[in-house]
Image (cartoon, rainbow, N blue to C red):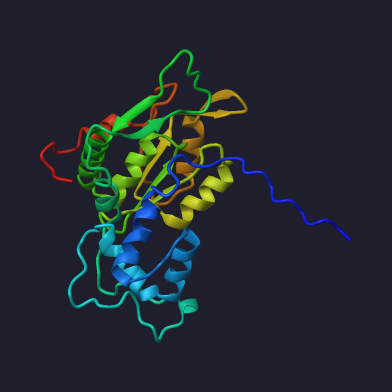
């Protein structure tokens, strides 16, 4: 007869066990809906069994903007099967950036930490941006995009590595209702052209350099080859990384178009 399997040894217990934001929300649900949910799994089960209560309550609990109008009493139409993707909160217009950019009320808290591939942290510091600085960068970039003719529904493309700048460009695009798409700069020429031809961007940002297999390579020639095959050609700006090529306008040239008085 086989011996019963022993339970695996406990490897780690969080110092915040029972004190996480998800625990706070579980206790909130218990109070409001007279539940006795003891675990995250219990909360998950309740959210699936009571989806209308869950989505309506979560929207208000998170303090999302705008507030739900009083006439919206259900999250979605129950008569439409979930497999058909019923619209949630029909008629409500929400801006992602408005909610994301004010997620932390402390303006001096760190919002972003930027570390690029190949950076030697023993010789150079990472880039840190506070929530106040992040909002200001997004505000000025959104203003510059608007004053460059970018409007709601236009496509903003970025051939850039994950960085502080790509986060700023994404949120600035979202702030004005533009559609943002990014492509890893080490993607081959044909892949870049194919993806950009599909979305026909009105403006394109590109890193000046990319790190591939430990080597830093300039991207100016590749960017020009991409532009030669895009019709119509988008406005193009270079984000400096290691070099500062003169073949294209610098991202500072874009920011110079911003009106410092434009609100976010």
Instruction: Classify residue 176 as left or right of residue 42.
Output: left
Residue 259, image x, y percentages: 14, 38
Q: Quadrant where the N terminus lies?
A: bottom right
Residue extending farthest top? 123
* Along the viewing direction, whichever of 161 and 90 lies nearer the viewer: 90
Image quadrant in which you'd find residue 126: top left
Q: Is residue 202 above or below residue 253?
A: below
Q: Residue at x 22, y 59 (%)?
A: 65
Q: Residue at x 37, y 26 (%)?
A: 127
Residue 158 or 136: which is nearer the viewer? 136
Query: Is 203 located above or below residue 64 in the figure?
Result: above
Q: Quadrant of residue 36?
A: bottom left
Closer to the camera, 37 or 112? 37
Q: Residue at x 56, y 37 (%)?
A: 186
Residue closer to the observer: 87 or 76: 76
The image position of residue 205, as x and y in percent, is 38, 39
Residue at x-position 39% and y-position 28%: 247
- x, y percent for residue 47: 42, 69
* Residue 211 in view in this figure: yes
Where does the image place residue 79, in percent across and percent down from the top left? Answer: 40, 86
Q: Does residue 122 appear to the left or right of 188 in the view shown?
A: left
Look at the image and tell me whether residue 237 can be seen. no
């Amino acid at each position: 007869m086989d011996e019963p399997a022993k339970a695996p040894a406990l490897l780690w217990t969080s110092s915040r066990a029972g004190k996480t934001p998800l625990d706070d929300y579980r206790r909130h649900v218990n109070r409001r809906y007279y539940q006795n949910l003891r675990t995250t799994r219990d909360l998950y089960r309740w959210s699936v069994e009571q989806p209308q209560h869950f989505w309506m309550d979560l929207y208000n609990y998170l303090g999302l903007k705008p507030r739900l109008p009083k006439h919206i009493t259900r999250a979605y139409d129950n008569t439409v099967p979930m497999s058909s993707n019923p619209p949630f909160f029909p008629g409500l217009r929400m801006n992602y950036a408005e909610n994301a950019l004010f997620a932390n009320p402390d303006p001096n808290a760190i919002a972003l930490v930027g570390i690029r591939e190949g950076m030697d942290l023993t010789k150079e510091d990472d880039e840190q941006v506070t929530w106040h600085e992040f909002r200001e960068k997004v505000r000025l970039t959104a203003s510059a995009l608007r004053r460059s003719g970018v409007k709601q529904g236009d496509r903003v493309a970025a051939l850039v590595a994950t960085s502080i700048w790509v986060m700023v460009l994404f949120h600035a695009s979202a702030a004005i209702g533009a559609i943002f798409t990014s492509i890893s700069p080490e993607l081959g020429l044909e892949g870049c052209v194919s993806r950009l031809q599909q979305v026909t961007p009105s403006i394109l940002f590109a890193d000046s350099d990319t790190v591939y297999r430990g080597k830093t390579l300039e991207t100016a020639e590749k960017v020009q080859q991409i532009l030669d095959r895009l019709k119509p050609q988008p406005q193009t700006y270079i984000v400096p990384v290691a070099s500062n090529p003169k073949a294209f306008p610098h991202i500072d040239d874009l920011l110079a178009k911003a009106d410092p008085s434009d609100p976010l």
